[in-house]
Image: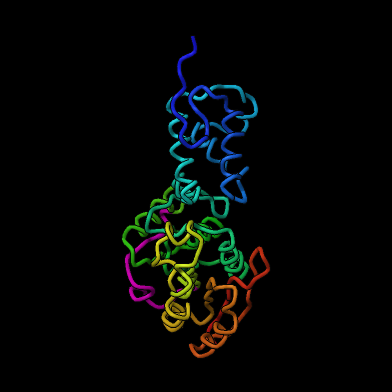
Amino acid sequence: MTSPRASDPNGSAPEGATRDEALRRLRAKLAGAGFETAALEARVLLLAALAISAAELIARPFERLTAEQASRLAAWTARRLSHEPVARILGEREFWGLPFILSPETLVPRADTETVVETAIDLVARRQTGLRIADLGTGSGCLLVALLHELPHATGIGVDRSAGAARTARLNATRNGVWSRSLFVVSDWGAALAQGVDLIVSNPPYIATGVVDRLEPEVREHDPRLALDGGEDGLEAYRIILPEARRLLSPEGHLVLEIGYDQEPALRDLAATAGFTVVRFAKDLAGNPRCVALKPT
């Protein structure tokens, strides 16, 4: 006799369901809830819940879920249906092809932020001697770790006012093999740093306070507000970072900042006032200005 299946409150898949059935049910559930990338999210959640590879899913689609697997998948489905991001559910996110652990104090790395890494590398890749990098508001450490991974001659320091974020960034540096060339400290922007930095990068909070509460629930309810809220006009962090970066940078140094899609004019004015010349604005995957590269005037 077949044993009774475990309860299935979210319509994902009960104990005894096949992997293929579980995938189809989860995909339909997410699509019905309006998630635009339901097929991808269902696949990612299923593979993680079952702790299997995509190849194993293809090779053994009719393997049945255990009670533990069904329970885990049901719990994760409920979390996603409440608009918790998949990356938060899994506890990590890939950035620049590298895995990054997440914590409540860290922003989930976005693909558009890779524009900062690309721009920074293009500016400094030809340098053959030691390169000193600072990442202001490091969060998960994704910018600094990605840069150190690509620039073996570089060393770097990541700064964050959150001790939890600094701990997470340190874990990510260790996980990705750059811990010996990195240091993470708790401080407010560049206050704890000394002069002579060759490259400063930052993805500061740049969303206007009045807009934060209107963001999609995946962001406003799960990303730390400290990493989102850029003050009344979204420019508060830049007004602090720009003069500090001017003090810290070497004469031939560069500052690369992520910006909001509509902030190019404001950043031009703020940069000029702080003593910087615009090297370039770089666009994100949607064709919007996403970062600005500056050098001391």
Residue in front for this viewpoint, 47 or 280: 47
Residue 133: x and y in percent read 47, 68
Residue in front for this viewpoint, 112 or 138: 112
Measuring 61% from the left and 64% from the top, which residue is drawn there? 118
What is the magenta range? Answer: 179-198
Residue found at the far right of this picture: 287
Work out which quarter of the rendered image holds the C terminus and state it.
bottom right
The answer, for residue 176, to whether it is visible in the render is: no
Residue 283 sits in quarter: bottom right
Measuring 46% from the left and 69% from the top, which residue is drawn there? 212
Residue 151: x and y in percent read 54, 60
Q: Is residue 192 magenta?
A: yes
In the rendered view, does 106 fall on the left or right side of 120?
Answer: left
Residue 85: x and y in percent read 49, 51
Residue found at the far top of this picture: 1
Picture mark count: 0
Q: Is residue 204 above or below residue 79?
A: below
Measuring 58% from the left and 61% from the top, which residue is drawn there? 114
Q: Is residue 208 above or below residue 23?
A: below
Q: Is residue 124 above or below residue 84?
A: below
Residue 135: x and y in percent read 45, 67
The answer, for residue 166, to whether it is visible in the render is: yes
Coloration of the structure image: rainbow
Q: Is residue 275 magenta?
A: no
In the rendered view, does 104 fall on the left or right side of 268?
Answer: left
